[in-house]
Amino acid sequence: MKFRYTLAEHWVKKIVGFGEFASGATQVTVRTRGGKVFGGILVSNCMWIIAARGHEDLPFALDDIEEISQTADDLNPRRGGWQFWDDWQVP
């Protein structure tokens, strides 16, 4: 399956250490080079961004990512509110 937004290998390696809230699903927060912060970013299998809470499409360019982190809210996200543009892949 082809995904629209595949993260660079260095981000994948970082996300591997983050907590999953469901099988293969990790929610993260992204800070862009311009300083904008986007929470509720859903990553499947540590490598594909498949949804962003409250956005129909990714609200930033992949090459604009400066930092990916995981907050307490990311570890225990509220269910729903994502508009999926790719399928969630269970590992």
Image (tube, rainbow, N blue to C red):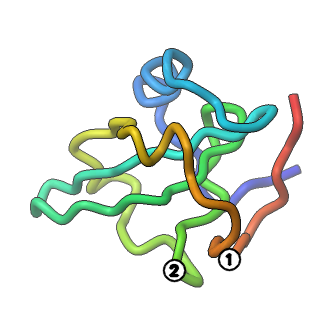
Residue in view at x 77 percent, y 63 percent:
86
Residue at which label 1 appears: 83
Q: Is residue 63 above or below residue 70?
A: below
Is 69 placed left or right of 67 in the picture? Answer: right
Q: As drawn, is 32 to the left or to the right of 19?
A: left
Q: Secondary structure at mark 1?
A: loop
The CA span between labels 2 and 1 is 7 Å
Residue lying farthest to the left in this orientation: 34
Amino acid bearing label 1: Gln
Q: Is residue 59 above or below residue 4?
A: below
Q: Categorize mark 1 by other alpha carbons within 10 Å: few (<14), some (14-19), many (20+).
A: some
Identify residue type, mark 2. Gly
Asked if disc 2 and disc 1 are in contact, CB closer than 8 Å, the reply is yes
Q: Residues within 10 Å of mark 2 (few under 14, many from 20)?
A: some
Seen from the viewer's position, the closer of residues 19 and 37 is 19
Residue at (39% x, 36% y) in the render? 70
Q: Is residue 31 left or right of residue 3?
A: left
The answer to which quarter of the image holds residue 32 is bottom left
Image point 11% across, 63% down: which residue? 34
Query: Any mark on residue 75, and which?
Result: none
Q: Is 8 or 25 nearer to us in this picture?
A: 25
Using the image as rendered, state which of residue 89 and residue 18 is in the foreground.
18
Task: Identify the residue position indicated by label 2 in the image.
Answer: 54
Q: Position of residue 68 (x, y in %)?
A: 34, 39
The residue tagged with tag 2: helix, strand or loop? loop
Q: Position of residue 78 (x, y in %)?
A: 60, 59
Looking at marks 2 and 1 on the same chain, the residue that comes earlier in the sequence is marked by: 2
Q: Quadrant of residue 76?
A: top right
On screen, residue 10 versus residue 76, left or right, reads left
